Image (cartoon, rainbow, N blue to C red):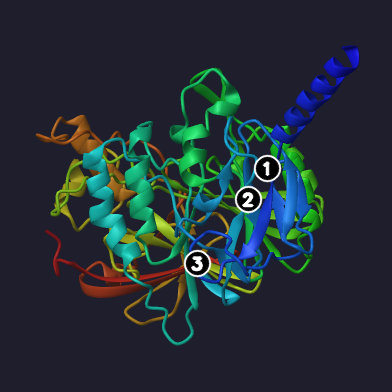
């Protein structure tokens, strides 16, 4: 009797152990139906992870990994493979929810390797209802739906990276967003943001809706000669709160993942909240020590910002890519009925185009709804009579050329030339952006918001993206043209030009 009980107990333990692990096959999906059919072979040597541990598939493409609460199973795609199925690549990953089967196969197809490709870095779509979803599909989507006109020397491949806060706490919109992103001609990847979480007392369950719909909130993949590491630094703090932190599990994953990344690859980190505000970023820097130049792409701030971090043999250039919803879909509506939602430092609603070429990259800000060459706001004080009524500009001298360069930073060199003359260096100046000053004044005197609009709460804040040049006396009469160039060693480039005209005589 005792022997029989022991056998039953061992059998039960065996079942428990099996339930605590997942296994499957990574295979070539010849007919691209997402199912392993007869004759479709497994792929040897593909890295597979549960977000904690990383293993390699064997000669038959098999792997086995432990179950992890709130984890997902995913292959770390080499540059010459992608996944068969949804165009949202990480949506093809497998969330390990309780009670689902202990198997997960991954269907891969070969793709052409292109070391020259474009990444559209799309921050904070952050739709809270169907009206805001309509704004997004009316403005951002037409730009992404149109294949890039890459030109003779342009990138040969284009992908999208949505940088978190897909929704504004309304997770019921996930189905529609999943469909809409899947309609884009490019393959897309997504990041989890603080407004994309379930409200739950169990920390590891706060990402369950996102992970079930979008596959995983942390993973890695390769494109060309670039290795992307997608992390989740929205760390639960109670049922609703959060702090900017990377979990021990994620740090273990990063440590293992980097062992497989050759030294000649550019590492690109991406998470929703800037590394600059992540409390244990030093732990991440230690894992990246000796990697040289690393690029980070984040969002969250609803303004464009750039940060620079240095550690042992490490230089991280961090791009805070702004928000496609701008200041949360608020402000006066434009001619198309969409809120202008100007961001605090003077940047319109935007995303960034980043062109990679081997380890090098070039980035530029794309203002939504504007031509690609409109990369800055060039303003001359003293011409528009409204300047005298704006409390933030009325004391600024007439004839000050101001350039709000979308994406500029302290390392950016800005120069201009007037009427085709010699190039002149412009000076970085901390002052409010003129377009922000206008909205702020209209708010303060009660003219904004007008009926059926919501106020855009512009504050009296200096812009970090603004340069100035005092026009010479000869350019303060009559018609003139100014050309502007902005560039820095971190791959940023922007150009702009405009004409302006002063009265011939003082008025």
The residue wearing badge 1 is 51
Per the image, label 3 sits on a secondary structure element best described as loop
Chain-order first, disc 3 or disc 1 = 3
Q: Is residue 234 left or right of residue 474?
A: right
The correct choice, above or below, for 302 with respect to 243 in the image is below
Q: Is residue 56 left or right of residue 427?
A: right
Whether label 3 touches label 2, CB < 8 Å: no
Q: Position of residue 246 (x, y in %)?
A: 66, 35
Alpha-carbon span between mark 3 and mark 1: 26 Å
The residue wearing badge 3 is 32
Alpha-carbon span between mark 3 and mark 2: 18 Å
Q: Is residue 5 left or right of residue 493?
A: right
Compare residues 168 and 444 and report the one nearer the observer.
168
Per the image, label 1 sits on a secondary structure element best described as loop
Compare residues 249 and 283 and report the one nearer the observer.
249
Q: Position of residue 43 (x, y in %)?
A: 70, 66
Alpha-carbon span between mark 2 and mark 1: 8 Å
The residue positioned farthest toward the front in the image shown: 1
Residue at the spot x=60%, y=66% of the render? 38
The residue wearing badge 2 is 74
Q: Position of residue 303 (x, y in %)?
A: 42, 45
The crowding category of the residue bearing disc 3, from other C-alpha atoms within 10 Å (few below 14, some 14 to 19, many at least 20), is some
Residue mark closest to the camera, 3 vs 2: 3
Q: Is residue 441 left or right of residue 261?
A: left
The crowding category of the residue bearing disc 1, from other C-alpha atoms within 10 Å (few below 14, some 14 to 19, many at least 20), is many
Q: Position of residue 440 (x, y in %)?
A: 26, 37
The quarter of the image holding the C terminus is: bottom left
The correct choice, above or below, for 494 with respect to 436 in the image is below
| Quarter of the image where one finds residue 406 | bottom left
The residue positioned farthest toward the right in the image shown: 3
């Amino acid at each position: 009797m005792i022997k029989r009980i022991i056998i039953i107990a061992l059998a039960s333990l065996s079942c428990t152990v099996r339930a605590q692990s997942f296994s499957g096959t990574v295979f070539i999906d010849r007919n691209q139906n997402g199912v392993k059919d007869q004759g479709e072979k497994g792929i040897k040597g593909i890295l597979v992870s549960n977000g904690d541990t990383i293993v390699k598939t064997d000669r038959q493409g098999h792997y086995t990994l432990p179950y992890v609460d709130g984890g997902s199973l995913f292959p770390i795609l080499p540059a010459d493979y992608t996944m068969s199925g949804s165009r949202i690549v990480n949506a093809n990953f497998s969330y390990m929810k309780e009670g689902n089967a202990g198997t997960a196969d991954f269907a891969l197809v070969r793709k052409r390797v292109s070391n020259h490709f474009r990444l559209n870095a799309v921050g904070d779509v952050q739709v809270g209802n169907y009206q805001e979803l309509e704004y997004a599909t009316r403005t951002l989507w037409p730009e992404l739906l149109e294949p890039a006109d890459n030109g003779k020397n342009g990138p040969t491949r284009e992908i999208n990276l949505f940088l978190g806060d897909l929704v504004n706490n309304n997770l019921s919109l996930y189905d529609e967003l999943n469909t809409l992103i899947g309609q884009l001609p490019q393959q897309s990847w997504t990041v989890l943001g603080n407004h994309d979480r379930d409200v739950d007392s169990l920390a590891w369950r706060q990402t369950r809706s996102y992970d079930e719909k979008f596959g995983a909130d942390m993973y890695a993949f390769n494109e060309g000669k670039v290795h992307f590491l997608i992390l989740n630094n929205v760390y639960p703090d109670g049922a609703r709160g959060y702090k900017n932190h990377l979990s021990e599990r994620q740090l273990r994953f990063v440590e293992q993942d980097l062992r497989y990344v050759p030294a000649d690859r550019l590492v690109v980190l991406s998470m929703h909240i800037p590394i600059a505000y992540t409390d244990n970023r030093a732990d991440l820097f230690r894992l990246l020590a000796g990697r040289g130049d690393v690029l980070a792409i984040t969002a969250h701030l609803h303004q464009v910002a750039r940060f620079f971090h240095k550690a042992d043999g490490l230089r991280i250039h961090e791009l805070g890519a702004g928000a496609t919803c701008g200041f949360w879909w608020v402000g006066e509506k434009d001619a198309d009925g969409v809120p202008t939602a100007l961001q605090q430092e003077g940047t319109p609603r935007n995303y960034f185009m980043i062109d990679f070429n081997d380890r090098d990259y070039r980035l530029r800000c794309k203002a939504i709804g504007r031509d690609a060459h409109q990369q800055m706001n060039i303003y001359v004080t003293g011409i528009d009579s409204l300047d005298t009524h704006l409390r933030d500009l009325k004391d600024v001298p007439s004839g000050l050329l101001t350039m709000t360069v979308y994406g500029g930073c302290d390392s950016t060199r800005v120069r201009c030339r007037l009427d085709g003359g010699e190039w002149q260096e412009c000076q970085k100046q901390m002052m409010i952006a003129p377009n922000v000053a206008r909205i702020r004044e209209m708010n303060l005197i009660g003219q904004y918001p007008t009926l059926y609009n919501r106020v855009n709460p512009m504050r009296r804040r200096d812009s970090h993206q603004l340069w100035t040049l005092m026009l010479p006396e000869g350019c303060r009469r009559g018609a003139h043209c100014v050309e502007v160039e902005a560039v820095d060693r971190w791959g940023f480039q922007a150009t702009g030009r405009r004409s302006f005209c002063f009265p011939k005589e003082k008025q």
